[in-house]
Image (tube, helix red, strand yellow):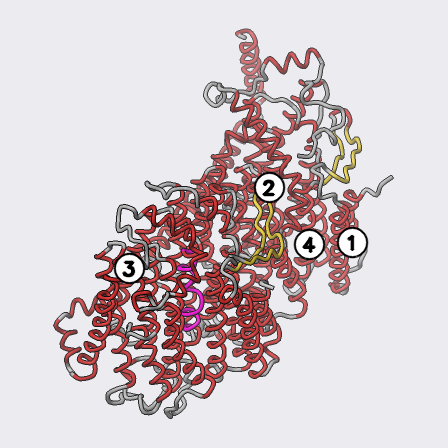
Amino acid sequence: MPVPLISILIVFPLLGAVLLLFINNRDNRNERVVRMFALGWSVAELALTLVLWAQFNGASADFQFVERHAWIPAYGIEYAVGVDGISLFLVVLTAFLTPLSLLSSWASLHGRVRAFSACMLVLESAIIGVFVSIDLFLFYVFWDAMLVPMYFLIGVWGYERRVYAAVKFMLYTMAGSVLMLIAIISLAYLHDVATGSYSFDLLRLYELPLSRRVQSWCFLAFALAFAIKVPLFPFHTWLPDAHVEAPTAGSVILAGVLLKMGTYGLVRFAFPLFPDAAVVFAPYLAGLAVIGILYGALVAMVQPDLKKLVAYSSVSHLGFVVLGIAAMNTQGVGGAVYQMLNHGVSTGALFLIVGMLSDRRHTRLIAEFGGLKRVMPRLTAAFLVVTLSSIGLPGLNGFVGEFLILLGAFRWRPSFAIWAALGVILSAVYMLWMFQRVNYGEVTNEKNESLRDLSAREWWALGPTLVMALLMGVAPTLFLRPMEPAVNRLVDRVSRSQRLTARDAGFGSRDSGFGLLTPASQISNRNSRTPNPESRTPNPESRIPSP
Amino acid sequence: MLVLIPLIPFLGFAVNAALGRRLSKFVSGGVACTAMLASFGIALATAWPFLFGSADLHAVEQNVYTWIKAGDFVAPFSLRVDPLAALMILVVTGIGFLIHVYSTSYMHDESDSEYARFFSYLNLFAAFMLVLVLGSNFLVMFVGWEGVGLCSYLLIGFWYRKTSAADAGKKAFIVNRVGDFGFILGMLLAFVQFGTLDFQRIASALAPMAPEAEFGTVSAIALLLLVGATGKSAQIPLYVWLPDAMEGPTPVSALIHAATMVTAGVYLIGRNAVLFSHAPDVLLIVAIVGTVTALMAGTIALVQNDIKRVLAYSTVSQLGYMFLAMGMGAFGAGIFHLYTHAFFKALLFLGSGAVIHALAGEQDMRRMGGLKRALPVTYWTFLTGALAIAGVPGLAGFFSKDEILFRTFEHGHVLLWGVGILTSLLTATYMFRVVFLTFHGASRVASHGHGDPHGGGHPLHLHDAPPAMASVLIVLAVGAAVAGYVGVPHALGGDNRIERFLAPSFESSAAAIDAAATSEISTPTGSESSHGVELPLMLVSTVIAFGGIGLATFLFLLSADAAPRLATRFAGVYRVLTNKYYVDEIYQTAIVEPVQMVSRQGLWQGMDVRVIDGSVNGIGALVRGGATALRQMQTGSVRSYAAALFLGVVVILGYYLFN
């Protein structure tokens, strides 16, 4: 029997969290042991994900390392996990950022360190679970499970208004999730209607023929849940609050990985499950994305608080990702997936830096800083690299993703690309202005006079992100190549339906009204109990040939 | 081997950036200079076959690795050198090396770590400029394009503790980003149109086509690229960053204005000569932008008091000439001027740097004067540069500027030619105003250094340039004097060698230009008939050059009160000019402030806080309200529950009955 690598990846951090509880940390006597243990454990998890990457077959578009076990057979619920080129790197990213954020918390976080570290490890498990699930029910379980540790991270270890922020974060996300749950259940039900058995299996559901009305409703339910998570304008207002109140480690994970669950959901579920609807709604999604790009950048520009600035910049950057997804071509989607990783690395690093500043000064207001370059030349140098990566300077990671997205969008609908490209100017404006106010000029506040430069621990937290920023900017093919087969398959799936759609002249005019009624063709399908010959073959893994 | 040309300065950067703190000035300066010299050596070896080898060598290419690949989009990191690029790398590494040597002395007052930081940036600047020049496709060029933008940001803001310097650096980067917006879109459109970003493939795809009669896709690409070019090459409307860029240390100004950065826009047009020549409408726009910029910057330069600011506007003006040439389809002439300009503008900036160095940081010409005797080397070399830029026959600027004006006239654009001649008068006048105010007349030097962090305020003793600086000035002065002889026109019995040398790079563009210009003068360039015009034109520009110098002599040397009297007589004009036509102020009030206002009041506090969060909180309140209402219904009265139950049953039954 092959090693169940993915299950190990999910369980391993969880196991670490459980083991942590056995360390006696009364009166924080073993704080250091707890920290070292959590860090070591998460590094080991990272090593495991690297094994996954090393064994991953980059030429294949299929899900790999697939494990299937019946879970609730009555409803066709399975424990089914696997990775393809799209999810692989998101798993690696999660495991990459977790040790860094644990490390970043060493100076600022005191008290209940054991619970904190356990929360971080549980969170890591849940997030990895989200990215590897290929059963919708399982996906939903992880999706909601992730909320619990995150809620505590913000609500317990956050800043002044942490409870408000935590509740807002929770409610926003739940609002979307509930609709998504309904859509997931309806899908399983429709599968039962069509084939006589419930199924939450993503690969089976991909092949389930759905009327356009059903597609439209389901797409909207999924898209709303994901749009809140991304967050897409105008569902973004939970993000600045959550970031400002979250501890550094929470912000890093939140911006670095959690937001990607939204865009990942669009790529993995919303678009391929409901391609006809996706084609119809893509322009609206792209419109919101472009508004988000410009809106996020403009609002970021006038923020007085560093964390809020970075939070709004995330709205802008994630707008690029959604735009790329909406374009639904190799460059757009490839760029979008790449940009998810980039954003994780550069925004993660930005939050690390903001955390380091806030550790020293206990404030995040830009106006409180100024002239730091003279006092902390190393931190400023690192800050500069991260800033440049965030504004998409060629040679660093951000550029590759942004350019591919713009190219994809331009090929799809040039007007979107033109508006989005304005974001390139604006990102330079708000980032460089912030950078100048923090680092250049004379030291005006004497509290800044004696700040110490990066410590060795901080180097270890920040250094890897700098290396990644450079590596991903110089050698993007290292990541783009294994991604491409999966991206192409996705694009093919959606564009195939686009072609069908184009043939069907009635679509878009006659049939654009929604209705939950299943059309007659599918009911007859159920009666005859014959699977649709076009779309069903016995083994879901080997069904679609690589393009 | 091509990759070594940018790689070596890049390694120099890496060494100084990583270890700079621990290196002595001698080592960090030495590393940087050696890197540039090595790069120049390899550049020379690369250019050699083009300069002296067989004529049928068109390009040498090196594919380093596949940088980005996604579906049918492939961007190899590959470098290519052709005659145009060969000339450019020689200018960048050659002039760049001289500026590095000069800097070792100029920056000597900085601390060790700052000194290393400075040289690491200089090396990086050169490396990116070389990538820009050598890139064989748009995307690789864009790496260099953005890279030089970054380096200008870092170097202009080198004295980051000064707010004005930090502001100027940021402004340079952001204004350039506006240009990049055009560049990126132009690049996207080019890829959609041609399926490749490779310059050569695009050119050969276009070569068989006729120039666009109307404004079409090719014109759109060209126009978008032009937006990018106006950003880098400081043309209207994006020139505003360059005059502020003098906030950087003077060698940086020399580097930006002469060898790197501002030449990038001109080079972009030259690199895409075929594309531009297929878009005649855009070419005309290029010419007009160039001419108007040349005139406008020339008038501003006339009244500025900061020596570097005059030179900065002079650069903007001279770049206008290059744009005019490009717009006329005289790509060779434009590049020729770029090349001669690199010598005399580097010379003038470094000369002004020597003056500033001697005066411990003083830049205001109103506090100079009479420096001729104290700074003989600086004076004579600066004078050479001034004569060259003024267009005095025999020196470099004369040949290249004259070629541009001649080609403009030849194309029948007499108006543009006229403006060009007028600008030429202005050039001679403002340059000699600088010479006279700085070196001649009575000394107005204050006894202490002033403002500039460079000075440090130690007591002033006038000293001529130290050896490292002086030798560089002399080399550049020789260059400014003789560099033009590679392009002696046929009318003077020369054979315009540089034009022939560059010809392979512009081959298929020439055909398109001729095709587009058939309605105009059809004489092929260099033929006998045009010599008839060329000589009188040359005479005109010579007279103009001397006229300008004469005017400056009268206004700023002979007559003590002529210039002030003029200023009061035309007070309105004078005020507009000293305030640079208020362009910065217009941008500030028309763009910067409204955008900030809308973002703060409209989007953030209005949309985000009030509308979105307001409605989220509103829904929250509604839910709470609803919950309260529901609680009211839980009266605990069995009768009301029974009534509700009954009502419910009736409704459900009714529903099924009527369906």
Label 3 close to label 4 by CB (< 8 Å): no
The residue closer to the viewer here, B412 or B125, is: B412
Q: Where is mark 4, residue-wise?
A: A96
> Range of the magenta residues?
B253-269
- How far apart are labels 1 and 3 at the CA level? 95 Å
- Amino acid on which disc 2 is placed: Gly
Residue A285 placed where, x, y %?
50, 37
Q: Quick check: A333 above or below A422?
A: above
Q: Is residue B89 left or right of residue B483?
A: right
Residue B345 placed where, x, y %?
37, 73
Q: Chain of mark 2?
A: B
Q: Where is mark 1, residue-wise?
A: A21
Q: Residue furthest top?
A: B657
Q: Chain of mark 4?
A: A
Q: Where is mark 3, residue-wise?
A: B528
Q: Earlier in the sequence, mark 3 or mark 2?
A: 2
- Which of discs 2 and 4 lies nearer the camera? The answer is 2
Q: Is residue B178 visible?
A: no
Q: Quick check: B66 above or below B462?
A: above
Name which residue lies at 34% across and 62% down.
B322
